[in-house]
Image (cartoon, rainbow, N blue to C red):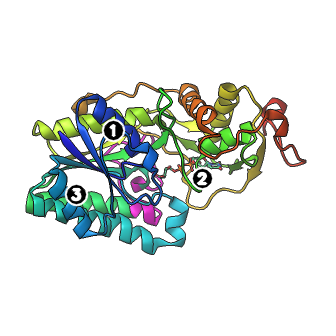
Amino acid sequence: MRILVTGGAGYIGSHTCKALAQAGHTPIVFDNLSSGHADAVRWGPLYIGDILDPDALDAVFANYRPDAVLHFAALAYVGESVTDPSRYYRVNITGTQTLLDAMRRRGVTRIVLSSSCATYGIPTVLPISEDTPQQPVNPYGFTKLAIERMVADYERAYGIRWIALRYFNAAGADPDGELGERHDPETHAIPLAIGAALGTALPFSVFGSDYPTPDGTAVRDYVHVTDLADAHMRAIIHLDTCGNSSAFNLSTGHGTSVRAVVSAVAIATDLHVPLLYSARRPGDPPALYARADRAAQVLGWQPRFVSIVPIVETAVSWFLKNGERKGHRIGTPEKNYVGNKVQSLTRGIK
Ligand SMILES: O=c1ccn([C@@H]2O[C@H](COP(=O)(O)OP(=O)(O)O[C@H]3O[C@H](CO)[C@H](O)[C@H](O)[C@H]3O)[C@@H](O)[C@H]2O)c(=O)[nH]1
């Protein structure tokens, strides 16, 4: 199949393009490179365009005649969505609608969408299932819920079939070392903790140690990016074989605390992770982890990575291999900042 991949120069999109190409499909990347990287597009053509631009979308559909669409292009910082909701509503909701309307004009009827655990808000029951009420607590989560509703309406009215994949915390890097996580600015826990250990970033700030969780730090479900890529492949095949439209959690079922992430980084790097304890980050739920039974039953999907250390190890390999070349200076352990407020794992964390 020829698959149009919006946001294919980004973190999850690029890993998925590699998986598509390895399975014999042709990924056609459509990306405005606002946060993606042209050098991550290696498995098919790159068309530089914006999902808010109907002419650019018409051109890429006309030139490449894709059979289906994988839609990753979006803004995805929860905190930024609170301070600048306008951009989130425009890019995520209007952008998705512009894309769906372009599909209608070209008669393309299959789409796999990136949704999020953020659509659940703060769940009262854990683990989350797809039937858990979706009550987002920030604009980002609301935009993802809105696009799930939008595709369902487009299916009823226009026959566009869809799969919404609700990612939990995407993590890790291509085990072959060809791709990894490169955000600017970087806000995610694992790359920041690795940077702190390697001395390329400030000490790692633990956002909140007074949560009602076993060790007091927030719990998330970290799912490996290559497992997410595999789920997209399965979703496309499901739609191609006339499977029903549906939403699926993509998660491991395991909750991992921020402390456990820091421990995993210390193990994977064999370095101390300098720490600071700070206040909770506004909008962060205490715990999010989920069952992915529906993806197992319907798509036959099982994550290959289920524990945090091997996930972090792939990310560390990527950082060590690519830090210099990508402009992130790899420091030495001796250069790690050690100040009064900084604690390291070997001194124990409280
Ligand atoms: O410097 C940091 C960064 C993060 N955290 C903590 O680590 C956990 C994970 O944080 P990330 O920033 O790595 O990930 P998020 O859970 O905030 O974000 C993920 O889930 C969001 C939905 O909730 C969006 O989908 C987003 O794109 C996706 O990366 C959170 O408890 C956070 O408070 C820290 O303690 N210190």
Identify which residue is drawn at 61% across, 36% down.
319
Identify which residue is drawn at 52% across, 36% down.
255
- Secondary structure under badge 2? loop
Q: Nearer the viewer, residue 6 or 307?
A: 6
Establish whether ligand 1 lies closer than 8 Å to the Cβ of label 1. no
Number of residues whose C-alpha sits closer than 10 Å to that of mark 1, classed few (under 14), some (14–19) or many (20 or more)? some
Q: Are marks 1 and 3 in contact (CB under 8 Å)?
A: no
Specify whether residue 100 is in view: no
Q: Which mark is residue 43?
A: 1
- Point out the image quarter for the N terminus: top left
> Which of the 4 image quadrants contains residue 25?
top left
Number of residues whose C-alpha sits closer than 10 Å to that of mark 3, classed few (under 14), some (14–19) or many (20 or more)? many
Which residue is under mark 2?
Answer: 187
Residue 60 falls left or right of residue 200: left
Residue 47 falls left or right of residue 34: left
Establish whether ligand 1 lies closer than 8 Å to the Cβ of label 2. yes
Which residue is under mark 3?
Answer: 60
Identify which residue is drawn at 13% across, 55% down.
160
Residue flagged by tag 2: what amino acid is it?
Thr
- Secondary structure under badge 3? helix
